[in-house]
Image (spheres, rainbow, N blue to C red):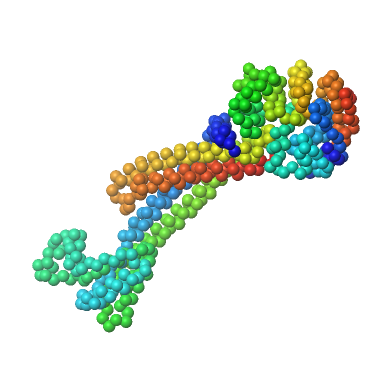
Amino acid sequence: MQDVWKTYPNGTHALQGVSLQIDRSEFVYVVGPSGAGKSTFMKLIYREEVPTKGQISVNGFNLGKLKQRNIPLLRRNIGVIFQDYRLLPKLTAYENVAFAMEVIEAPRKIMKKRVMEVLDLVGLKNKANREPAHLSGGEQQRVAIARAIVNNPSVIVADEPTGNLDPETSWGIMQLLDEINFRGTTIVMATHNKEIVNTMRKRVLAIENGHVVRDQLRGEYGYEF
Amino acid sequence: MNFNTLLRHFREGTKNVFRNGWMSVASMLSIVVSLSLLGVALLLVLNLDRAADEVDRQVEISVYLNLDIQQADRDRVEQEIRDMPEVQELTFVSKEEGLEEMRETLGDAMVKGYEETGTNPLPDMYKVQVIEATTVPFVADKILALNDGRPEAPIYEVDYGKGTAEKLFQWTQTIRIVGLVLVIGLGVMAMFLIANTIKVTIIARRREIAIMKLVGATNRFIRWPFFIEGVLVGMTGSALTLAILLYAYSRVELAASSWKAALFTMIPLHEIWLWFSILILGLGFLIGAWGSTISIRKFLKV
C-alpha cells in the first residue's frame, strides 16, 4: 500500500495516507478502536472498496487499474472470513464450501475430494451435511474458514473472526488460522481480542483515526478498555 | 463455460426453486393470475371479433337490375362491379333462381301463381360481398352511380339494409376497440404484478449474491442459476395457466354449442389451442427470463 486515502461520500476520512507492506506468509493483526478504519483497511484488500487516492497492490494485481471483470480473479486468490460467518443459509456445510470451488469451475471429482479434505482439516468432516442453522457459532466459523482456504488462496483476510465466539471456541479458531499460516498463507486479521494478540505475538498494526500509529513485529495489543 | 458448469447451473437453478419454496409459489401464482387475466381477455376479444365478423358478413349488397336490361349492359355492369377494389365476391342471381329462393323462404303457395301463368315479376340481380364490411354503404353508392350518364339506367335499385347495417358496424367497431384496450391494459398490469414479485424475491436474496461475489464468482456465473430458476418458475406458471384456460374454454364451448339461439358460434378449440399454447408458454418464458435478468442486474455491482 502506498499513501492510501479513503474518504466516504458522507465525508468520513476512514484512512489517511497509509503506506505499508505485508510480505508473503506473514501473520498480521490489525487492531484499533471501533471506527478507526480497520474494516475499510480490510475491504480495500479484497477490493470491496477502492481507495480515493493512492495505490494498492495485492498478489501482483494493481487494484487501482483492475478491471471490473477481473475482480473475481483477484478474489479467488483471497479468502475472506467475517465476524458473522456469511454462509448461505440454505446450503449444507459441504455445499457452502464446494460453492467456492464451483465458481472456479473445478472438476467434480477433485472438488469432492478437496472439500472433504478441508472439512476434515477444520474438524467438521462428520457434519458436512448440516445446514448452518444446525451448527454452533464456532462450527459455522470453521465452515467459513474451510470455504476461505479451499482454493488455496495466498492471502486470508479475517475481519474479527472471533468476535461472536466465546474464548474457548476462539482459541480453536486461532489455532486453525495459525496452522493455515504455518502452511504458507498470508493472514491479515482485524481483532479486538487482546488476549489472543498478546499470546500469539505476531506483527501488529494499530490504526487510529485513519492513521497507522504503530507497526510492530511480535507486538502486543496495547489498548486498555 | 464447460459442460459440467452448465449442468451445475441447471441443478442449482432447479434446486433454488424448491429452496425458495414460498417465494417460488408466490411468483408462480402471480404469473398464473396475470396470464389468466390476459388469456381470458384475449379469448374473449378473439371470439367477439369473430362474432362481429360473422355479423358483418351477413350484410351484403343486393343490386336489382332493370327488367328490360340488355345482355351487353348487364355484362358491362357486372364487369364494373367486379373491378371495384372493395368488392370480394359477386354472384349473379337470375330471375328464375330468385323465384326458387322465394319458394324456399316464403313457401310454394306464393310462387305457384307465377309459375302457372309463366310470368315472373322478379328482376335479375347481383349479390355483392365486400372485403371490408364497413365499406358497404360506400360501395352501394358507388354501384348506384353506375347509372349516371346512361340514357337507359341498367340498375333499378341497390339495397343493403340501410340504417340497420350502419348501427351494427358501429357496435362491432366498439367491441373491437374495447377488447383491444382490455388486452393492453391487462398486459401492463400483469407486467407490474410480476415485476413487483421479482423485486421482493431479489431483495430477499441480496445477501446471497453478495456472498457469491465475495468468493470470486463472475457475474455470468451468478446470473445463470437465477436465469434458469426464473424461466422454470415462469414456464411452470404459464403451463398451469394454460391448463386452466384450455379446460375452461372447452367447458364453455361445450355449453355454448347446446345454446341454440346463439347469433354466432365460438371459435372451436382445435383451431386455436396450438398458437394459444405457444403464446402463453412463450410469455411465461419471457416473463421469467426477463424478470430474473432485470432484477439481479443492479445487485451484481458489488
The percent coordinates of residue B225 (x first, y second) are 58, 36
Report x, y in % for residue A177.
76, 23
Work out which quarter of the rendered image holds the N terminus of chain B and state it.
Answer: top right
The quarter of the picture where residue B301 lies is top right
Q: Is residue B70 visible?
A: yes
Q: Is residue A31 above or below residue B256?
A: above
Determine the residue positioned at 17% across, 67% down.
B96
Q: Position of residue A165 (x, y in %)?
A: 75, 21
Which residue is the extreme one toward the bottom?
B151
Closest to the observer: B216 or B106? B216
Q: Residue furthest left?
A: B116
> What residue do we see at 82% from left, 34% from top?
A37
In the picture, measured across the screen, residue B86 lies left or right of residue A166, that is left
Residue A16 seen in the current view: no
Left or right: residue A77 versus residue B175 is right
Name the quadrant containing residue B59.
bottom left
What number of labels is visible? 0
Residue B31 vs B171, above or below: the answer is: above
Looking at the picture, tell me which residue is in the foreground, A191 or B55.
A191
Of residue A210 and residue B22, the one placed in the foreground of this image is A210
Q: Can you say whether B57 is above or below A183 in the image?
A: below
Left or right for A55, reference B122: right
Q: Residue at x 39, y 40 (%)?
A: B247
Residue at the (83%, 32%) spot, across then down: A22
Q: How far across and how far down the image is residue A210, in percent?
A: 86, 36
Q: Judge by depth and name the residue closer to the eye, B198 or B106.
A: B198
Picture quarter with the C terminus of chain B: top right
